[in-house]
Image: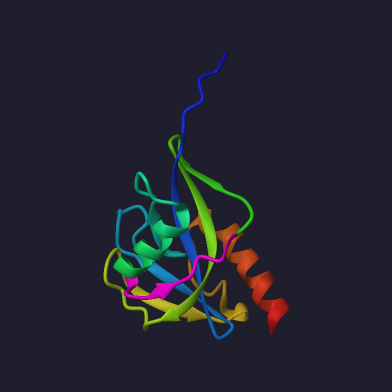
Amino acid sequence: MSECVAKRVVVAGAVIDGGRFLAARRTAPPEFAGRWELPGGKVEPGESAQEALVRELREELGVEVEALGRLPGEWELKSDLVLHAWWAPLLKGEPQPLQDHDELRWLAPEQAFDVDWLEQDLPFVEEVVRRLDRTT
């Protein structure tokens, strides 16, 4: 019988505003520096994924979002870490690269692949583009 190891969830947010979504360029760790991601972070013990996303985006970008729904799929980051992404409309604030990022960029669907995304974010970016294309 195989042992079931609980994976820690990392959340990423597709921050949506006015038909665009936010991309964030990482500064660390070195193997990810200079590449782009949907911003987020680890879920802490006792916290829901939605609560973690709201907290992480407040800490990292200085914005308030609502975690409205999880995007389909997940990506294994390490044997004990799995990435989930959420649709997260911007409620208030102007995003600033406060932690872990040195540049932010709002992307319209047709600009979505103008940046060098981390591989684990690509399926989520594709889903965000599909959803934004349907609403415009």
* Residue 91 falls within the magenta-colored stretch: no
Q: Which residues are magenta?
A: 61-70
Q: Is residue 96 above or below residue 78?
A: below
Q: Pick the residue in front: 94 or 101.
A: 94
* The furthest residue to the front: 46
Magenta stretch containing residue 64, yes or no?
A: yes
In the depicted structure, whether residue 30 falls above or below residue 95? above
Tell me the quarter of the picture where residue 98 sits: bottom left
Residue 34 in view of the camera = no
Query: In x, y percent, where is residue 63?
Result: 37, 76
* Image: 22 above or below 8: below
Name the image quarter holding the N terminus.
Answer: top right
Q: Is residue 38 visible?
A: yes
Q: With 125 as the anchor, is 11 left or right in this view?
A: left
Estimate the x, y position of residue 111 in percent, counting from the top left.
Answer: 57, 79
State the image coordinates of residue 129 (x, y, percent, origin top left): 64, 72
Which quarter of the rendering shows the C terminus? bottom right
The residue lying furthest to the right in this view is: 134
- Along the horizontal axis of the image, is 14 left or right of 40? right
Identified at 38% across, 68% down, the residue is 25
Instruction: Judge left or right: residue 130 versus residue 33.
Output: right
Q: Nearer the viewer, residue 63 or 27?
A: 63
